[in-house]
Image: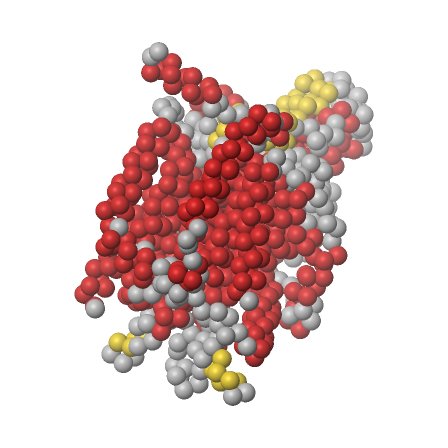
Amino acid sequence: MLTTDILIEWLVKIGVVFFILMTAIAYVVLLERRLLGFIQMRLGPNRVGPFGLLQPLADGLKFLFKEDIVPLEADKALYVLAPMIALVPALMTISVIPFGDKIVILGREIALHITSVNVGLLVVFALTSLGVYGIALAGWSSNSKYSLMGGLRSSAQLISYELALSLSVVGVIIFSGSLDLVEVVKQQNSFWLGFIPKWNIFTQPIGFLIFLIAAIAETNRVPFDLPEAETELVAGFHTEYSSMKFAMFFIAEYANMVTASSMATLLFLGGWYGPFVDKFPLLGPIYFSLKILFFLFLYIWLRGTLPRFRYDQLMRFGWKFLIPVALANVVLVAGLALLIY
Amino acid sequence: MEKVFFIIIASLSVAAALSVVAQRNTLYSAFSLIGLFGCLAVAYITLQAHLIAAIQVIVYAGAIMVLFVFVIMLLNIREEELRVDRNRLLIFSVPLGGLLFGLIYFGLKNFKIDEIKGAPVGTSEAIGQGLFSKYLLPFEVTSILILLAIVGSVVLARREKDGDIEDIEDDEQVVKVSMAEKSKVEETKE
Amino acid sequence: MSELAKYNEVAEEFATEELVLNMGPQHPSTHGVLRVVLKLDGEIVTDLDCDIGYLHRGVEKICEHRTYAMIAPYFDRTDYVAAVSNGLCYVETVEKAMGIEVPPRAQYLRVALTELSRISSHLLWLGTHAMDVGAMTIFLWAFREREEILKIFENFFGARLTCHAFRIGGMSYDAYEGFEQEVKQFCDRFPTRLAEMEQMLNSNRIWLSRTVGVGIISAEDAIDLGLTGACLRGSGIEWDIRKAHPYECYSELEFDIPYGENGDTYDRYLVRMEEMRQARRIVIQTIDKLPTGAVTAARVPKVLKPPAGDYYHSNESPKGELGIYLVSDGSTQPVRLRIRPPCFVNLQALKKMCVGRLYADVVAVIGTLDIVLGEVDR
């Protein structure tokens, strides 16, 4: 039954996780700019605060004070709605992501996730599949050709790569026998030969790579950043957006990056598990963040290295390579599961 | 508590459903429909059927409606073109609507919500058991049906074109077909 | 009704409209103020039209009202990313018309600076071309190298963009102290830096798939359209004015002319990369062989009056053949001065290269043509 203390616990958890997520997003942006600067032999933002650490704050203020422009011929209601539709699902996914085992604070046992759904994996997919509306709508309602093309590209891309993404996860589900993210992580807790962790990445490396590629495509990042291909579509679906509305798309993109990274961690890298987590459960979130950081670094590294795909190449890669490989991987993993269990 | 929640969700769904038919702009209608699917998903969650809720969002809101929105956006129908004689429609719609309501009333007259409340009908286990034992044949037949639909759409969409852009055309067809395939994949996944 | 008629009827019913897209004049990858009117069927370009003239300043007309010495600085502002070689072409034309022999030291300095400007122009091309295709890092790396050249230019000319030190009859001043060392330092570092950039692109499968087979132009078409420079050599034609009609001291220097095979974007990329290496080779030779002596011809009249007649002179600018057609009536001002801008001519290939391809290829092709709108519009 819903009692007051449970309610307070929920509210506190939601508040803390939301705060951490937003801070993380802000600093991922800074990390990206500094790392890109490093890759590109320049400094990056280092003027605001020590090492540029206050830069996200300055950026946020700048977004707030910019003029909010709505194009004259735009469909105003949908134009305003679009960034919200993009942002809300992106932020909601964090609610089902577990980032640690149970810990004890002030004599209360607290599970380190906002809520545990027995189909958590599907909920994440459901929410990310809604994000496409924000982008498609933004493209359509701006009444600009660049935006429209960006919106169309992005919808086609998200739909295509979602398939490979869900197929690559099937292997993990076969192993864990559950759609619950906590169960998926717990299944990866034991060791082979006493020291090799039973992470899914070792049993199904192909699935991991497919997941990684598809996740990068799902988050519209280089080399799959066609929807906002700056040199082709000016800025793609958010060409006409300014001020906080643009910031909302921006936050959504980075929130999606964080989500994709945490999903990769949970599904393939053993979530929050690492040395001594059993004794000190507080280490769990730290390991979890470090693993996420690894994927975020990968995102940025790719952006500093790779050019962009062309639309037809992207589609061909998705449909003619990734999906067949993903299907074969499902069969392979199913056979492997029969052997092991 | 649950009742209050249900009333909120139910009224929201009814409002969304009304908005689907009342909106002049087809895109607004489509979005009302997506909203309706969202409300239904929440209703499923209150019945502890998390799986059905997730599937509802993934398949209907996330996949099928994307296609709808796609088509509407590409066709870009103007509002004037959609104007029809409302009075004439009224003649058909009122009796038909009345009939439907009557059917629903008689169908649900003896139905008690408590009967399904505790029953585990919406869990992945229950659905899996059902699909692979009791409903195995219909399930497989449905998948063949969807396969036929895929083949059919490929045949329909196939256009003979010369020149080097043919390859690209092919890819675009694949995208069109993808939706049907996608919903199938979602189904077979369980 | 036959099957075909049925099909046609259905096709008509679902007929689609083409999307007319105005790419530019303000667009991140039209390299200035080029406006391309595209007709798109989905992502495929069905028709294309270039609208130029947004940067037209009437340079040719202005020249008719200036004395010969006053005209020279205008040429730094046509192709502003290779101001040195453009300025060179003009002074050479007047020198040719008046029969002025330039002292060897001036010739060697001119070639050294021109080849440096070729490297800087190609680096700018590499950066923006890679950026157009999506490789952001190459852009900044290329600009870092370009910066080194611009530092030398700043020391030499006092300007980074509109570099101007060539006078009719030689140079306005000699090289500054330490010029040779700085150039040599740059030449020592440059190959490794260039190799770094090539490493990022040559083995990159996405880069290859975006450039190989994109924007193909056959050798015949290239000649018919009058393409010059890397756009022509990429199609497999070994034509370089530095070899064909050597000017300055090019006949005394050793260098190779790289040329491609398939005439696609990747070949043009390879050609330009090799051209940078060859340009570095030339620079090293000029610095090694740099003669001593005056940098201005002894007998240059105070008032420049080329004898009446028509003169044409062209040189190999980084973009291609830059030609100047000069009509003189023996007075202090030209009657007509016509510039043959390589970018303007090369731009004509855009339609041939893009129609039937994808929208993203247009961006790659504009990059590979290496246009500068200041020169296209003049």
Residue B76 on image: x %, y %: 57, 32
Identify the residue at image location x=36%, y=70%.
A183
* Left-right relation of A166 to A16: left
* Left-right relation of B12 to A279: right
In the displayed image of the protein, which residue is found farthest to the left? Answer: A339
Name above or below for residue A13 compared with residue B99: below
Name above or below for residue A141 compared with residue C306: below
In the displayed image of the protein, which residue is found farthest to the top? Answer: C1
Residue A100 on image: x %, y %: 45, 76
Residue C301 figure quarter? top right
Q: Which of B25 and C373 is in front in this view?
A: B25
Q: Which of A255 and A102 is in front in this view?
A: A102
Residue C7 on image: x %, y %: 38, 19
Identify the residue at image location x=68%, y=23%.
C338
Residue C339 figure quarter? top right
Q: Can residue C80 be seen in this view?
A: no
Q: Quadrant of the C terminus of chain A?
A: bottom left
Across the whole image, how many numbered discs are drawn on residues?
0
